[in-house]
Image: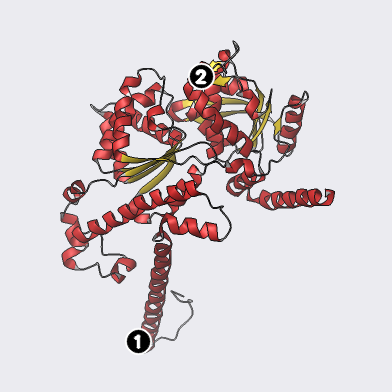
Amino acid sequence: MIGCIVRRRPTGQGFLLRQERYWASQGASSATELAGLAVHIYAEEEKKSERGPMAAYEELITTGQLRQDARQQATVAALQRVYTDLVSQRAAGKSGRTTSSGLTLVEARRGENKVETGWWKSIFSSNDSAEQKQEAVKGLYMYGGVGCGKTMLMDMFATSVPRDMNMERIHFHDFMLEVHELLQEHRETADPLSLVAKDIASKSKLLCLDELFVNDIADATILHRLFDQLWSKNVTLVATSNRHPDALYEGGLQRQLFLPFIDTLKKKCVIHDMDSERDYRKLAHHASGLYFTSDQRESELESRFIELTNKNPIEPMVIEVEMGRRLKIGRVGGCIAYATFAELCDQPLGAADYMALSHAKHTLALSGVPIFDAKSKTSAYRFVTLIDILYENKVRLLCSAEGSPEEIFAHVQTYSESKSGTADDEDSVVDDNLGFVKDRTISRLIEMQSNEYLVAHASRHAPELILALKEEKEARSRARYAKR
């Protein structure tokens, strides 16, 4: 250990000098041990990150955690190409310029603390010119239907990237919220969007955006300029989406302002179709007691709400929303909030409000979800956004609805479906954007009832529930086996 126990010592300069030397040697020895430990830990972490996504994927196949899937394997190969290019670019950059401070134990081990290439020189030199000479690695845009594994492969890629690559993995909703917040911060400047791009590029040279989907004119009008500047600053984009780039913001207002973004996206990223015949979410076991559709659905939801308050008082709550707004929730008890569909989706609320709610309470009881029709199209859009944010934040959802996840979207059609004559009643909602995203929302509503999702929820918000969920799953398995 470093340090010593304070004790009474005999006087005398010789004794004191021997003691000081003894404790100094102990401290030096301990420091050496700590340095060795730090180097070992860092080396182990680097080994893990140097394997790349393909090695991680093959390990999951070997251990039986994933099934063989040709489309997924092709996608991993595409991700491996991005990874290899990034690692090669990093190596070339390191050989061409100094990036080390020369002050840490690990850097000292690597021999990077020489005076001519170390911290002293870095104070007076700039790497800007070297960075400008390097072109950004060509990114990847993965698109496919729900449940084909896009988000899982994105996460696997993100965790395989070396830590010093300045990577950010974020959901597209969250990313755009941050962009609008930064625009607010820089609103007094002549060109706030340029400063936003500079802020993002200074922190992230690799941007991983999950579920890129545009249905808001405010987002559509700034994406072209924003990403033009990010790409000019050598930011690499890896993104997932349900739609081909040409189908993004289809039918949206002033779409002509968005088209240049699509053109540049196709130049800066490889466009990869990863549609799979399997929907892995539907392979999960669906637990009961979370999604109520019977005639007694409201009373069933109320009973579950009361149960999950765990005898805590039920009272109103005001949640602070970014940019100075507030969201009022009428009934909150313990970990759970109760709200009606009309309160959350018929009102002019958006992603920021739903994000604040998901951060305030990790369980939501949502009452009165209707079957969507032409009159409720705007509310349906808000519902899609709400489910996306609840899902990304692993919020547990209890819901009463007029029909199953498939039934509540039964009237929603794409334009091609309407032309083929499948939109056959006045309640039909003919909307390409909503028609495409409904499948994702249906899939997520189903998955959010599964034991696997509930375990993920518990792992993030309530670890004490994990054992109970495991025992419940085993009990159901035993019950099914006993019936055979």
Judge the density around disc 2: few (<14), some (14-19), many (≥20) Cα neighbours within 10 Å. Answer: few
Task: Give the residue at mark 2.
Answer: 348
**Residue 356, can we see it?**
no
**Residue type for callout 2:** Pro
Q: Secondary structure at mark 1?
A: helix
Q: Picture coordinates of residue 307 (x, y %)?
A: 75, 36
Q: Residue furthest front?
A: 420
**Residue 293, can we see it?**
yes
Q: Picture coordinates of residue 45 (x, y %)?
A: 42, 63
**Residue type for callout 1:** Gln
Closer to us: 461 or 246: 246
Q: Earlier in the sequence, mark 2 or mark 1?
A: 1
Judge the density around disc 1: few (<14), some (14-19), many (≥20) Cα neighbours within 10 Å. Answer: few
For residue 29, above or below residue 200: below
Q: Which mark is residue 13?
A: 1
Q: Secondary structure at mark 2?
A: loop
Q: Residue at x 17, y 60 (%)?
A: 121
Closer to us: 127 or 380: 380
Q: Residue at x 53, y 57 (%)?
A: 60
Q: Residue furthest right?
A: 483
How far apart marks 2 and 1 lie (CA) works out to 79 Å
